[in-house]
Amino acid sequence: MTETRADNVTWLTQEAYDRLKNELDYLSGRGRREIADKIEAAREEGDLRENGGYHAAKEEQGKIEGRILQLQGILENARVGEAPRTEGVVGPGMTVTVAFEGDDEEVTFLLASREESGAPIDVYSPKSPLGAAINGKKVGEKATYSLPNGRSMSVEILDATPYAGG
């Protein structure tokens, strides 16, 4: 197996990997057959220009194919197990607490793949603007990232500890 660049790696728990693999297997097998049957049944109803069932089935087929490609990409770059972590340094698999500039509230979240959505706390992707800005930073350091509206936001890293599950 060849190693890919670290920023392309998606760290997944064994449970998340298995769940995504099962979803991929279903969609690329039975899911494709079921949607093909729906399309064929709708096609037999006649005029395709005014056939809502046909168009809905074709749209569903597009969504399935998109999800298959997304899952293939995630699983292709997945590493199962624990991401290498250093206490006090932000990285995938870490529970991170930050304070936003100008805000007294602290926010705590898990920095991990969004596919780890079963976590009992909010999950931020390392590829998100905030996740990318804080990745590799140490406790006490500040990071600035761009918001969707073009403005920038600064955060201070208050804590970074390995995620212990929940």
Image: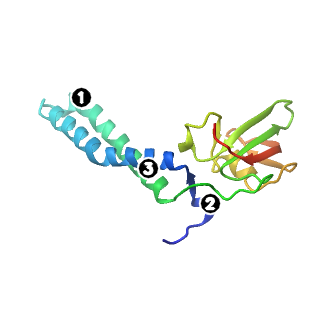
Q: Which-is-in-front pick, marks 1 and 3?
A: 3
Tell me: 150 left or right of 159.
left
For mark 1, what is the residue? 53
Whole-angstrom CA distance, mark 2 to mark 3, is: 17 Å
Whole-angstrom CA distance, mark 2 to mark 1, is: 42 Å
Along the line of sight, which residue is nearer the eye, 79 or 130?
A: 79
Tell me what residue is drawn at x 31 percent, y 41 percent: 61
Tell me what residue is drawn at x 21 percent, y 41 percent: 36
Along the line of sight, which residue is nearer the eye, 126 or 83?
A: 83
Judge the density around disc 2: few (<14), some (14-19), many (≥20) Cα neighbours within 10 Å.
few
Judge the density around disc 1: few (<14), some (14-19), many (≥20) Cα neighbours within 10 Å.
some
Along the line of sight, which residue is nearer the eye, 162 or 155?
A: 162
For mark 2, what is the residue? 7
Whole-angstrom CA distance, mark 1 to mark 3, is: 27 Å
Image mark count: 3
Along the line of sight, which residue is nearer the eye, 120 or 41?
A: 120
Q: Where is residue 147 in the image (x, y as percent from the top left)?
A: 71, 41
Q: Which amino acid does label 3 sit on?
A: Leu
Q: What residue type is labelled 1?
A: Gly
Tell me: 127 left or right of 97.
left
Tell me what residue is drawn at x 80 percent, y 52 percent: 88
**Element assignment for label 3:** helix
Query: Where, by quadrant of the figure, is residue 108 drawn?
Result: top right
Looking at the image, tell me whether mark 2 or mark 1 is earlier in sequence order.
Answer: 2
**Element assignment for label 1:** helix
Q: Position of residue 126 (x, y in %)?
A: 65, 50
Q: Where is residue 116 in the image (x, y as percent from the top left)?
A: 56, 43
Q: Do the residues labelled 2 and 3 touch (CB within 8 Å)?
A: no
For mark 3, what is the residue? 71
Looking at the image, tell me whether mark 1 or mark 3 is earlier in sequence order.
Answer: 1
Judge the density around disc 3: few (<14), some (14-19), many (≥20) Cα neighbours within 10 Å.
some
